[in-house]
Image: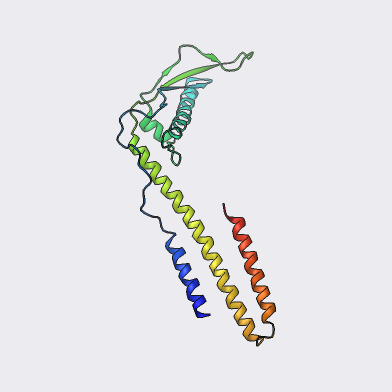
Protein backbone atom coordinates (compact mmCIF):
# COMPACT_ATOMS: atom_id res chain seq x y z
CA UNK A 1 0.00 0.00 0.00
CA UNK A 2 2.95 2.29 0.58
CA UNK A 3 3.76 1.97 -3.12
CA UNK A 4 0.26 3.12 -4.00
CA UNK A 5 0.64 6.25 -1.91
CA UNK A 6 4.09 6.96 -3.34
CA UNK A 7 2.76 6.53 -6.88
CA UNK A 8 -0.15 8.91 -6.23
CA UNK A 9 2.18 11.43 -4.62
CA UNK A 10 4.47 11.30 -7.65
CA UNK A 11 1.49 11.86 -9.98
CA UNK A 12 0.46 14.85 -7.85
CA UNK A 13 3.94 16.31 -8.16
CA UNK A 14 3.90 15.88 -11.94
CA UNK A 15 0.52 17.59 -12.19
CA UNK A 16 1.76 20.45 -10.03
CA UNK A 17 4.78 20.92 -12.29
CA UNK A 18 2.49 21.10 -15.33
CA UNK A 19 0.71 24.14 -13.87
CA UNK A 20 3.61 26.47 -14.63
CA UNK A 21 3.63 28.61 -17.75
CA UNK A 22 6.06 27.19 -20.29
CA UNK A 23 8.49 29.41 -22.10
CA UNK A 24 7.45 28.04 -25.47
CA UNK A 25 6.39 30.72 -27.91
CA UNK A 26 3.74 30.29 -30.61
CA UNK A 27 4.81 30.78 -34.18
CA UNK A 28 5.76 34.39 -34.63
CA UNK A 29 4.74 34.80 -38.24
CA UNK A 30 6.32 37.63 -40.19
CA UNK A 31 7.15 40.11 -37.44
CA UNK A 32 9.03 42.47 -39.68
CA UNK A 33 6.69 42.94 -42.61
CA UNK A 34 6.24 46.58 -43.55
CA UNK A 35 3.04 46.44 -45.58
CA UNK A 36 -0.31 46.51 -43.78
CA UNK A 37 -2.12 43.22 -43.14
CA UNK A 38 -4.35 41.86 -45.89
CA UNK A 39 -7.71 43.63 -45.87
CA UNK A 40 -6.48 46.41 -43.57
CA UNK A 41 -9.10 49.21 -43.57
CA UNK A 42 -8.11 52.59 -44.98
CA UNK A 43 -10.88 54.48 -43.23
CA UNK A 44 -14.15 53.94 -41.38
CA UNK A 45 -17.34 55.93 -41.10
CA UNK A 46 -19.04 56.78 -37.83
CA UNK A 47 -22.62 57.95 -37.47
CA UNK A 48 -24.46 59.90 -34.80
CA UNK A 49 -27.02 62.55 -34.05
CA UNK A 50 -24.13 65.05 -33.78
CA UNK A 51 -20.48 65.09 -34.81
CA UNK A 52 -19.19 64.21 -31.35
CA UNK A 53 -21.33 61.07 -31.28
CA UNK A 54 -20.25 60.26 -34.83
CA UNK A 55 -16.57 60.56 -33.82
CA UNK A 56 -17.04 58.09 -30.98
CA UNK A 57 -18.91 55.72 -33.26
CA UNK A 58 -16.11 55.94 -35.82
CA UNK A 59 -13.61 54.70 -33.20
CA UNK A 60 -15.93 51.82 -32.30
CA UNK A 61 -16.24 50.92 -35.97
CA UNK A 62 -12.45 51.05 -36.32
CA UNK A 63 -12.06 48.58 -33.42
CA UNK A 64 -14.54 46.19 -35.06
CA UNK A 65 -13.02 46.43 -38.55
CA UNK A 66 -9.47 45.94 -37.26
CA UNK A 67 -10.52 42.96 -35.13
CA UNK A 68 -12.09 41.28 -38.16
CA UNK A 69 -9.01 42.05 -40.25
CA UNK A 70 -6.59 40.52 -37.71
CA UNK A 71 -8.72 37.38 -37.44
CA UNK A 72 -8.55 36.96 -41.23
CA UNK A 73 -4.75 36.95 -41.44
CA UNK A 74 -2.68 33.82 -42.09
CA UNK A 75 -2.01 32.87 -39.36
CA UNK A 76 -4.90 34.73 -37.68
CA UNK A 77 -4.49 36.89 -34.59
CA UNK A 78 -7.40 35.68 -32.47
CA UNK A 79 -6.16 35.75 -28.88
CA UNK A 80 -5.61 39.52 -28.68
CA UNK A 81 -7.44 42.45 -30.25
CA UNK A 82 -6.73 46.17 -29.85
CA UNK A 83 -9.18 48.04 -27.66
CA UNK A 84 -10.37 51.60 -28.17
CA UNK A 85 -7.46 53.07 -26.22
CA UNK A 86 -4.90 51.24 -28.38
CA UNK A 87 -6.73 52.20 -31.58
CA UNK A 88 -6.86 55.86 -30.57
CA UNK A 89 -3.18 55.92 -29.61
CA UNK A 90 -1.58 53.92 -32.41
CA UNK A 91 -3.94 53.19 -35.30
CA UNK A 92 -5.89 56.34 -36.11
CA UNK A 93 -4.39 58.56 -38.83
CA UNK A 94 -5.18 62.07 -37.69
CA UNK A 95 -8.38 63.46 -36.21
CA UNK A 96 -10.57 62.64 -39.21
CA UNK A 97 -13.11 64.83 -40.93
CA UNK A 98 -16.84 65.40 -41.12
CA UNK A 99 -18.81 64.02 -44.03
CA UNK A 100 -20.08 66.53 -46.56
CA UNK A 101 -23.71 65.48 -46.17
CA UNK A 102 -25.88 63.90 -43.52
CA UNK A 103 -27.16 60.42 -44.30
CA UNK A 104 -30.49 58.73 -43.80
CA UNK A 105 -29.86 55.47 -41.97
CA UNK A 106 -33.41 54.11 -41.95
CA UNK A 107 -35.70 54.16 -44.96
CA UNK A 108 -39.03 55.95 -44.71
CA UNK A 109 -37.92 57.69 -41.52
CA UNK A 110 -37.31 61.42 -41.48
CA UNK A 111 -34.14 61.09 -39.42
CA UNK A 112 -30.65 61.86 -40.64
CA UNK A 113 -27.28 61.30 -39.00
CA UNK A 114 -23.99 63.16 -39.05
CA UNK A 115 -21.04 61.32 -40.60
CA UNK A 116 -17.46 61.26 -39.36
CA UNK A 117 -14.79 59.81 -41.65
CA UNK A 118 -11.82 58.43 -39.74
CA UNK A 119 -8.67 57.41 -41.66
CA UNK A 120 -6.65 54.43 -40.40
CA UNK A 121 -2.85 54.33 -40.40
CA UNK A 122 -1.51 52.13 -43.17
CA UNK A 123 1.68 51.22 -41.27
CA UNK A 124 0.49 49.52 -38.06
CA UNK A 125 3.03 48.04 -35.64
CA UNK A 126 2.51 44.50 -36.91
CA UNK A 127 5.32 42.93 -34.89
CA UNK A 128 3.99 44.49 -31.70
CA UNK A 129 0.48 43.18 -32.36
CA UNK A 130 1.82 39.69 -33.07
CA UNK A 131 3.75 39.74 -29.78
CA UNK A 132 0.65 40.84 -27.89
CA UNK A 133 -1.23 37.96 -29.51
CA UNK A 134 1.51 35.51 -28.52
CA UNK A 135 1.38 36.71 -24.92
CA UNK A 136 -2.40 36.28 -24.85
CA UNK A 137 -2.03 32.78 -26.33
CA UNK A 138 0.46 31.78 -23.64
CA UNK A 139 -1.86 33.10 -20.94
CA UNK A 140 -4.74 31.06 -22.36
CA UNK A 141 -2.60 27.90 -22.46
CA UNK A 142 -1.37 28.54 -18.92
CA UNK A 143 -4.92 29.06 -17.64
CA UNK A 144 -6.03 25.81 -19.32
CA UNK A 145 -3.11 23.92 -17.75
CA UNK A 146 -3.84 25.36 -14.32
CA UNK A 147 -7.49 24.34 -14.59
CA UNK A 148 -6.58 20.83 -15.74
CA UNK A 149 -3.94 20.45 -13.03
CA UNK A 150 -6.37 21.72 -10.39
CA UNK A 151 -8.95 19.11 -11.37
CA UNK A 152 -6.24 16.46 -11.42
CA UNK A 153 -5.00 17.36 -7.96
CA UNK A 154 -8.56 17.32 -6.64
CA UNK A 155 -9.12 13.88 -8.17
CA UNK A 156 -5.90 12.51 -6.69
CA UNK A 157 -6.75 13.98 -3.30
CA UNK A 158 -10.16 12.32 -3.44
CA UNK A 159 -8.53 9.02 -4.47
CA UNK A 160 -6.08 9.21 -1.57
CA UNK A 161 -8.96 9.97 0.78
CA UNK A 162 -10.98 6.97 -0.47
CA UNK A 163 -8.01 4.61 -0.17
CA UNK A 164 -7.15 5.89 3.30
CA UNK A 165 -10.77 5.64 4.42
CA UNK A 166 -11.07 2.11 3.08
CA UNK A 167 -7.93 0.98 4.90
CA UNK A 168 -8.98 2.58 8.17
CA UNK A 169 -12.48 1.11 8.07
CA UNK A 170 -11.20 -2.30 7.03
CA UNK A 171 -8.74 -2.26 9.91
CA UNK A 172 -11.39 -1.04 12.36
CA UNK A 173 -13.83 -3.80 11.36
CA UNK A 174 -11.05 -6.42 11.35
CA UNK A 175 -11.78 -7.25 7.72
CA UNK A 176 -15.34 -8.45 8.34
CA UNK A 177 -16.82 -6.08 5.72
CA UNK A 178 -13.96 -5.95 3.25
CA UNK A 179 -16.14 -6.88 0.29
CA UNK A 180 -18.74 -4.20 1.06
CA UNK A 181 -16.05 -1.63 1.72
CA UNK A 182 -14.45 -2.43 -1.64
CA UNK A 183 -17.80 -2.01 -3.39
CA UNK A 184 -18.33 1.32 -1.63
CA UNK A 185 -14.85 2.54 -2.51
CA UNK A 186 -15.26 1.55 -6.16
CA UNK A 187 -18.66 3.30 -6.28
CA UNK A 188 -17.15 6.50 -4.90
CA UNK A 189 -14.33 6.36 -7.46
CA UNK A 190 -16.76 5.76 -10.33
CA UNK A 191 -18.89 8.71 -9.24
CA UNK A 192 -15.78 10.88 -8.95
CA UNK A 193 -14.69 9.82 -12.43
CA UNK A 194 -18.11 10.67 -13.84
CA UNK A 195 -17.97 14.09 -12.18
CA UNK A 196 -14.50 14.62 -13.69
CA UNK A 197 -15.80 13.91 -17.18
CA UNK A 198 -18.74 16.27 -16.71
CA UNK A 199 -16.58 19.23 -15.76
CA UNK A 200 -14.22 18.84 -18.71
CA UNK A 201 -14.63 21.63 -21.33
Q: How is the image coloured?
A: rainbow
Estimate the x, y position of residue 55 in percent, counting from the top left.
Answer: 46, 24
What is the quadrant of residue 128 in the picture? top left
Query: Residue sitting at 62 percent across and 56 percent down?
Result: 198
Q: Quadrant of residue 104?
A: top right
x, y percent for residue 46: 48, 22
Left or right position of 84 against 35: right
- Tell me if 117 is positioned left or right of 180 in this view: left
Determine the residue positioned at 45% across, 28% down. Answer: 62
**Residue at the (42%, 45%) spot, across then down:** 136
Q: Quadrant of residue 63?
A: top left
User: Residue 53 appears at what percent x and percent y?
Assistant: 50, 24
The foreground one among 64 and 97 is: 64
Q: Is residue 183 above or below residue 89?
A: below
11 relative to 52, above or below? below
In the image, is residue 167 above or below residue 111?
below
Residue at the spot x=62%, y=78% of the render? 166
Most foreground residue, 136 or 109: 136
Residue 165, position as x, y percentages in the image: 61, 77
**Direction top: furthest residue:** 101
Amino acid sequence: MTRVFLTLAAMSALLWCSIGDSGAQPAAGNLGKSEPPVGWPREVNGYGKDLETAKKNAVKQAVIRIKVCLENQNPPLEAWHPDEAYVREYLLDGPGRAGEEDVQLVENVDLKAKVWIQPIRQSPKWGEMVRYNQTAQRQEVSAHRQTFAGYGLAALTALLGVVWGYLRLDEWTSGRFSRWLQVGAITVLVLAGAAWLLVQP
